[in-house]
């Protein structure tokens, strides 16, 4: 049983530079929480404060109710996997994994058993006698994970552990780490800047920017109900398409006017937009929520600029007002570059953002979800 | 098939040429050292009276004695002339005094020992047969024994020198290593300026600093003492060690120490368990430089020592006073070079140490 609470955590690096401005967060038992954000957003600083590698300027850290704010890292009962593996090169794999157990004066037989157990779990059981220099990057990362597992800590910290691996291995390790988490059920915090990694691994995603939290939610929450344009643009490949539109409310009809198209909306479902009559809005639509339809039924037509086949589907790009838009189209539909396609929106999955604040305009239909 | 053969021949020719050149270069480098070693085993006679000089020292010397009206004559076989030539006094008789001085002469100039009784025996043979030849075994290490014999303070100076070198290693590596770690790991104001300024002490020639150093050491009560000398050597070594260890520590990722802190050690424990073993090759290199620098230093040592000279000073003085006895000088030089070579060979293991094929 381990829960983590961050109460109003902040980190000041001096000279007005804030690593983390304000962080309130609660991690539940057995949860796999991902801190996601662009570089420099403070996610790694936050993790290092939890690990005790960085002092806290303000705030309290509670691990299972115990205040660990000023406790030395070795007494916090947390494990960490580092971005550059940080597997000690002068020790064998066995010694690396057994390091903390030896320091805890665990009996020799028990150490041996524990090391073998954890090594088998991450599939490096046969490499115990080797030195890290003789291992590949992926194997070194497995050693780092095994070393963290062997301690049986209350809390696991992963600091961008997969970013040094090649693309294919990264996807494999992703799955394996999720599997390991499901087996061990250890509370984990995972830092990454790769949104697809975050989406595929997380129970909950914490999206950070400029030292603060922008949104906390399940992968589905942050994907489908992004709290602002930053999140909508950050999450998803390709990211959300943004259309600058003007909202008009006339004769009980809501219409979104874009320079290239006019989109009539059902006034019952989108009642909240009434108050934006005559104002600028941003319409956010996910790549897969723009459908290809016969030109007669289309809301607007566009010329295809680029086609990127992905096997299962294809990404089609077109230009509109100088901005690039990308949509995801089933692979069966035949298209050619330069040809016109008719497009329509999936009305159930539209997002609206305030042009000035860039915040999401909440619709009633979403709130009930 | 022909083409393959031609290509192989071509390649063989190229490699042969390359190796001939390489061996030539190696020969040029190694020959002076070989010359030094070879000469240190030669007798006075070999080094001065044979031309061209022998490549390798001989282990034996051939002598001949004959007799005419003036008395007995001693000859030694000269290898370059390929004949017996005059050796020692023009003539001598078989009285006790003459034989004793002859024995000494043989000992001094050919490094061979012979008893007067034996000499008398050979003289009897000459009396009977007109001449006698005999072969004597050369005392091969005679030059070394002689070197330590004539420089009375050499053994003490040798030990003193080792003591100075070890003290220099300890002082310069402790202070330099700690400073290097601070430079590598911590950010502070004026860091770069400070790091550069430690090199200033190396800009002055040792001689110019030696005299003020004598006064300072005298005031400290450390003049003419190994500790005082090692302090002077440490000044220069510390700055070098700071630079070397700083780059060594910088090459060890901080995350190694952080991982250690998380997995059960304190900050100091992380240094002992992780950083120190990883930095060992670099520290060993520092120790080697400190040792060699201190061991070979002669200019400051001449000024700073009086009654307790270091070994290089002894060698230097014997070199000045040896009147060109090249075989003695080479022996002294080799004794001087040997500890540095041995120390380097021992420490080489750590410098070349690699973990799992990856250099850190």
Image: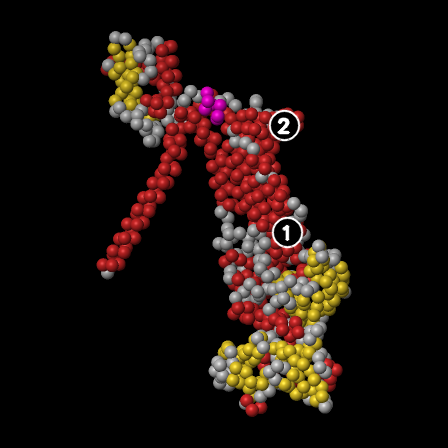
Using the image, tell me which numbered label, if any, was put on residue B270.
1
Q: Nearer the viewer, residue B55 or A260?
A: A260
Q: Residue at x 63, y 78 (%)?
A: A243
Q: Residue at x 36, y 40 (%)?
A: B25
Range shown magenta: B315-321
Figure coloring: secondary structure
Query: Up-down: is A173 above or below B270?
Result: below
Q: Residue at x 38, y 28 (%)?
A: B39
Q: Chain of mark 2?
A: B
Residue B333: image quadrant is top left
Instruction: State whether residue B285 appears in this view.
Output: yes
Is B328 positioned to the left or the right of B21 in the image? Answer: right
Q: Nearer the viewer, residue B143 or A342?
A: A342
Instruction: State whether residue B174 appears in this view.
Output: no
Image location (x, y in percent) of residue B139? 39, 25
Q: Secondary structure at mark 1?
A: helix
Q: Residue at x 58, y 77 (%)?
A: A321
The residue carrying mark 2 is B217
Which secondary structure type mostly characterizes the magenta part of the structure?
A: helix
Residue A354: image quadrant is bottom right
| Neighbourhood count class around disc 2 (C-alpha, 10 Å): few under 14, some 14–19, many 20 upward | many
For the N terminus of chain B, give its image quadrant: bottom left
| Neighbourhood count class around disc 1 (C-alpha, 10 Å): few under 14, some 14–19, many 20 upward | many
């Amino acid at each position: 049983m381990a829960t983590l609470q961050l109460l109003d955590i902040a980190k000041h690096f001096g000279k007005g530079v804030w690593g983390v401005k304000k962080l309130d967060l609660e991690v539940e038992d057995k949860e796999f929480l991902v801190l996601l954000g662009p570089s420099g957003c403070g996610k790694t600083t936050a993790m290092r404060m939890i690990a005790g590698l960085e002092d806290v300027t303000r705030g309290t850290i509670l691990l299972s109710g115990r205040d660990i704010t000023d406790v030395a890292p070795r007494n916090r009962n947390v494990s960490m996997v580092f971005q550059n593996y940080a597997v000690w090169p002068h020790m064998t794999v066995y010694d690396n994994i057994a390091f903390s157990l030896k320091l805890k004066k665990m009996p020799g037989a028990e150490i041996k058993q524990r090391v073998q157990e954890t090594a088998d779990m991450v599939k490096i059981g046969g490499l115990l006698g080797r030195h890290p220099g003789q291992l590949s990057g992926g194997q070194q990362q497995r050693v780092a994970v095994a070393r963290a597992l062997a301690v049986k800590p209350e809390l696991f910290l992963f600091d961008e552990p997969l970013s040094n691996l090649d693309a294919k291995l990264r996807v494999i390790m992703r799955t394996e780490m999720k599997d390991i988490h499901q087996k061990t059920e250890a509370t984990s915090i995972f830092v990454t800047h790769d949104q697809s990694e975050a989406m595929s691994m997380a129970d909950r995603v914490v999206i950070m920017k400029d030292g603060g939290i922008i949104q906390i939610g399940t992968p589905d929450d942050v994907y489908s109900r992004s709290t602002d344009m930053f999140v909508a643009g950050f999450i998803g490949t390709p990211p959300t398409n943004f259309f600058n539109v003007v909202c008009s409310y006339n004769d009980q009809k809501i219409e979104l006017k874009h320079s290239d198209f006019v989109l009539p909306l059902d006034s019952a479902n989108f009642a909240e937009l009434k108050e934006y009559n005559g104002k600028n809005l941003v319409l956010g639509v996910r790549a897969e929520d723009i459908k290809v339809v016969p030109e007669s039924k289309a809301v607007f037509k566009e010329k295809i600029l680029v086609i990127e086949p992905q096997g299962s589907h294809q990404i089609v790009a077109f230009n509109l007002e100088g901005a690039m838009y990308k949509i995801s189209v089933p692979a069966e539909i035949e298209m050619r570059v330069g040809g016109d396609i008719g497009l329509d929106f999936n009305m159930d999955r539209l997002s609206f953002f305030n042009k000035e604040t860039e915040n999401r305009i909440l619709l009633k239909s979403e709130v009930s979800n | 098939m022909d083409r393959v053969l031609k290509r192989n021949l071509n390649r063989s020719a190229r490699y042969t040429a390359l190796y001939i050149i390489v061996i030539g270069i190696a020969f040029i480098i190694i020959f002076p050292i070989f010359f030094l070693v070879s000469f240190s085993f030669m007798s006075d006679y070999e080094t001065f009276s044979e031309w061209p000089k022998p490549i390798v020292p001989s282990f034996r010397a051939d002598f001949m004695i004959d007799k005419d009206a003036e008395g007995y004559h001693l000859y030694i076989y000269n290898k370059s002339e390929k004949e017996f030539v005059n050796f020692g006094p023009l003539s001598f008789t078989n009285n006790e005094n003459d034989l004793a001085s002859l024995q000494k002469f043989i000992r001094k100039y050919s490094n061979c020992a012979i008893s007067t009784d034996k000499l008398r025996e050979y003289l009897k043979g000459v009396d009977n047969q007109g001449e006698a030849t005999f072969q004597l075994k050369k005392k091969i290490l005679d030059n070394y024994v002689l070197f330590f014999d004539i420089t009375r303070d050499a053994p003490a100076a040798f030990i003193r020198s080792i003591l100075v070198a070890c003290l220099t290693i300890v002082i310069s590596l402790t202070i330099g290593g700690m400073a290097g770690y601070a430079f590598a790991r911590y950010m502070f104001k004026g860091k770069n300026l400070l790091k550069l300024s430690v090199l200033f002490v190396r800009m002055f020639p040792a001689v110019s600093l030696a005299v003020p150093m004598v006064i300072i050491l005298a005031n400290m009560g450390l003049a003419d003492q190994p500790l005082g000398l090692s302090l002077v050597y440490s000044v220069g070594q510390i700055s070098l060690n700071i630079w070397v260890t700083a780059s060594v520590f910088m090459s060890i990722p901080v995350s190694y120490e952080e991982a250690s802190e998380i997995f059960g050690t304190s900050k100091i424990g992380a240094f002992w368990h992780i950083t120190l073993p990883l930095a060992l090759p670099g520290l060993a290199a520092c120790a080697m430089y400190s040792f060699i620098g201190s061991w070979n230093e002669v200019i400051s040592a001449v000024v700073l020592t009086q009654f307790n000279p270091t070994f290089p000073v002894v060698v230097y003085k014997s070199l000045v006073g040896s009147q060109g006895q090249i075989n003695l000088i080479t022996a002294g030089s080799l004794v001087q070079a040997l500890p540095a070579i041995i120390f380097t060979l021992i420490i080489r293991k750590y410098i070349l140490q690699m973990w799992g094929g990856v250099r850190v």
